[in-house]
Amino acid sequence: MSATLGMLLKQLDPKMTITLVERLDHVAHESTDGWNNAGTGHAGYCELNYTPESDDGNITISRALSINANFEVTLQFWSYLVEQQILPTPSKFINPTAHQSFVWGEKDVAFLRKRQQLLSAHHLFADMQYSEDPQQLAEWMPLVMQQRATDQPIAATRVEYGSDVDFGSLTRNMIRHLTTLDNFELQLSHSVKALRKNGDGYWHVTVRDEQSGEDKVFKARFVFLGAGGGALPLLQKSRIEESQGYGGFPVSGQWLVCKKPEIVEQHHSKVYGKAAVGAPPMSVPHLDTRIINGQPALLFGPFAGFTTKFLKKGSVLDLFTSVKPNNLAPMMAVGRDNMDLTRYLISESLQSHSNRVASLRNFFPDAREEDWTLQNAGMRVQIIKKDAKGHGKLEFGTEIVAAKDGTLAALLGASPGASTAVQAMIDVLERCFGDRMSSPEWQKRMKELVPSYGQSLVEDAELLKQVRERTLSTLQLRRS
């Protein structure tokens, strides 16, 4: 998110002075790193939790439409950066990977059939295929259908031009370019210790050099907090009125990983299923093709876990130190009302390797324990906020919190996260740089960066066709 915002700002105003502060000694090695996230170009093609089903059987597709349109915005910006040779060959960070949903049992098959009918009627999802034919499914997902019993209904949907994204490589390439520009500075191994808005209208940001122990103060007219799980503590340091009442619910994750070529070569898609009852949305099981730092692998998971850390390289005290008088009541309410979720997360973290592989066999019946190893994923801090009645509620989305004067913004939450980074950062620009964003110069430039800017891809089928043709071609997401 921070790299995306920096890139947008530098494209809009090359003379702008920007400092990027990173607490680690290298960039994009927390949640952004390839091994720390699913790498799914989240477009709503395969993620069943984006189309919830109500108790009366109605399926809501509005969130899937919004996420799909937002991802198209991201693809447009990446396409521009590739065309300008700011980003490298697309295969260095994004690869065509079919997006598929797979379900079994009469109830879930009926759900998937209805979901496909609703989505494919809209131009954003017009290319979504559906099948209940075991032979067709065996062509789409060989590993999933190997040795699978045929005594129950099964079904799948497929969108051919889904993608696998190495967000770590993408981010490091963006920042590598930014460091070549005038008036851009990267501060590695530096931690933000204090944020204070002074009477001169500037934020005074106290930053500590973790190697020398020295503190320095930066003066900034605008501050963006894009620190993943670390954004909430920084937002609290700012003490802006809009930060009041926000808390965080940290969730850890793990993957089963297979790198054996003879297995990896048989699977070329992301296959998503339905989450277990009581599981958080981030725990939707999926078997994924991954290409990280150019190396192919298969991942299955994620297996969620309970933690009190906000960052993978954080402190076990993170959750406790985030409790403040203004968010105590919402956090206690969420803790009280989500005991089932807490128990689920703890039980997930205590699973044996055999139990995890047993879950994998729902997607890959022939899976052998010795072919898969366990790897830790990144941390996710879900949002806790006050509801309309002043009580606490747990949110599983992404949310921008901005000061009313537009001088500070923070990004909280998780999924769909990085896939919608460009639209999220455009929202930050419109809220915090409103006057400049409405100027003819920035309006024209935005249309060059994102041709659909200011228009709705959800409502305009012809516009979608134009931008999608360009992005699929430029980013090489159509299979030959």
Image (tube, rainbow, N blue to C red):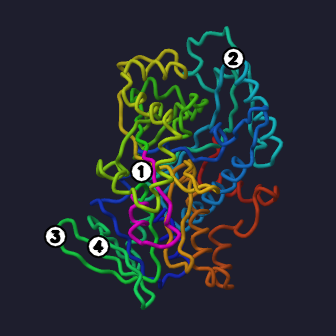
Q: CA distance from mark 3 to mark 1?
A: 26 Å
Looking at marks 2 and 1 on the same chain, the residue that comes earlier in the sequence is marked by 1
Q: CA distance from mark 2 to mark 1?
A: 37 Å
- Residue 189 placement: quadrant: bottom left
Tag on residue 207?
Answer: 4
Relative to residue 385, is residue 216 drawn left or right? left
Amino acid type of the residue that numbered disc 4 sits on in the rendered structure: Val
Magenta range is 230-250
Question: Callout 3: helix, strand or loop?
Answer: loop
Amino acid type of the residue that numbered disc 1 sits on in the rendered structure: Ser
Tag on residue 116?
Answer: none
Rendering coords of residue 256 (x, y %): 41, 30
Looking at marks 4 and 2 on the same chain, the residue that comes earlier in the sequence is marked by 2
Quarter of the picture holding the C terminus = top right
Looking at marks 3 and 2 on the same chain, the residue that comes earlier in the sequence is marked by 2
Question: Callout 1: helix, strand or loop?
Answer: loop
Instruction: Give the residue pinned by disc 3.
Output: 212
Q: Is residue 479 magenta?
A: no
Tag on residue 31?
Answer: 1
Q: Residue at x 42, y 27 (%)?
A: 347
Q: CA distance from mark 4 to mark 1?
A: 22 Å
